[in-house]
Image: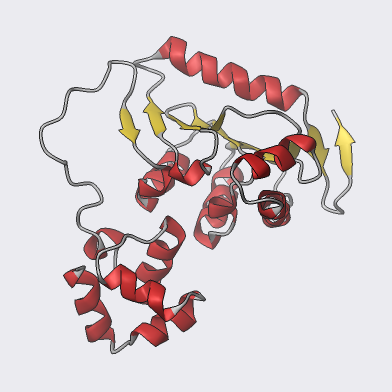
Amino acid sequence: MNAALRKALAEAQLTETDVAAHLGVDPKTVRRWLSGQRPYPRHRWALADLLQTEEHNLWPDLNRPTGDRNPLPEHAYRVYAHRWQIPREVWWDLFSSAEQEIGILVYSGLFLADDAGILNLLRARAQDGVNVRILIGNPESQQVKQRGKDEEIGETLAARAQNALILFRTLMEIDTIEVRTHSTVLYNSIYMTEKRILANHHIYGLPAAKSPVIEIDPNVSLDMSKAYTKSFEQVWESSRFQTKNHKENKV
């Protein structure tokens, strides 16, 4: 049972039905959260906003060590078993710490595009002079359609990519933000700055949210960071430039 969440709801005088209505989920889902099931990140963030508290106050075990573990390999700064386990603060710190470059390479990245706070952060960093490059899978490409089949979600992935594209396009009034689409087979999603890289592996049959993520410090693992940076640049070179009126131009 999640006692912290139950207490927060009681203090806010909110019922399971109230929370379900606010978040657009079934009351049974809220009941499972209260029983101890951890929500997906977007729901954790929305709940924290609704209850006007921090995410770690509702799920204190997010960053808690799970007992004795073997030390990580020297090339990995941190490893997450699933992308959904990454606290919002990690994404926020990743992008807010950038001074030169932010790169996002995904099939959809809707969990970021659907977060108004993250969009505002990317906009703010770009206004401060940070170069922001975002690569989204072309919703009409065979690669995105095949990935949807591999994850057994059919056309849902293409729809998510289209929605993310629309949301990310709202940033394009800033000169230092560029959004492109790609038609590439991705073996991992890449979220990078000059200070840190998060590489989300793609596993056949599993969505990226349920797949492992490794965090890399370029200062410690230069060769490894170069490999992911090179992969990003290769996709960027073959991508299509997006305009505000939804037209695409081959680079």
From the top left corner, tell me how far across and down residue 43 is, in percent. 43, 64
Residue shown at 56% from the left, 48% from the top: 122
Q: Residue at x 53, y 15 (%)?
A: 227
Which image quarter: residue 96? top left
Q: How far across and how far down the image is residue 22, in percent?
A: 47, 80
Residues 176 and 245: in front is 245
Q: Quadrant of the N terminus?
A: bottom left
Q: Nearer the viewer, residue 101 or 198?
A: 198
Q: Of all residues shown, which one is farthest toward the top? A: 223
Q: Residue drawn at (55%, 61%), measured in percent from left and top?
A: 116
Seen from this angle, which residue lies furthest bottom?
A: 13
Q: Is residue 186 above or below residue 246?
A: above
Q: Is residue 246 at all visible to an observer of this figure?
A: yes
Q: Is residue 175 left or right of residue 70?
A: right
Residue 179 in view in this figure: no
- Residue 154 in picture, x, y percent from top left: 68, 50
Image vertical order of residue 126 relative to residue 121, above or below? above
| Residue 190 at x, y percent in the picture | 54, 32
Residue at position x 35%, y 50% from top?
87
Please tell me in which quadrant of the rendered image residue 7 appears: bottom left
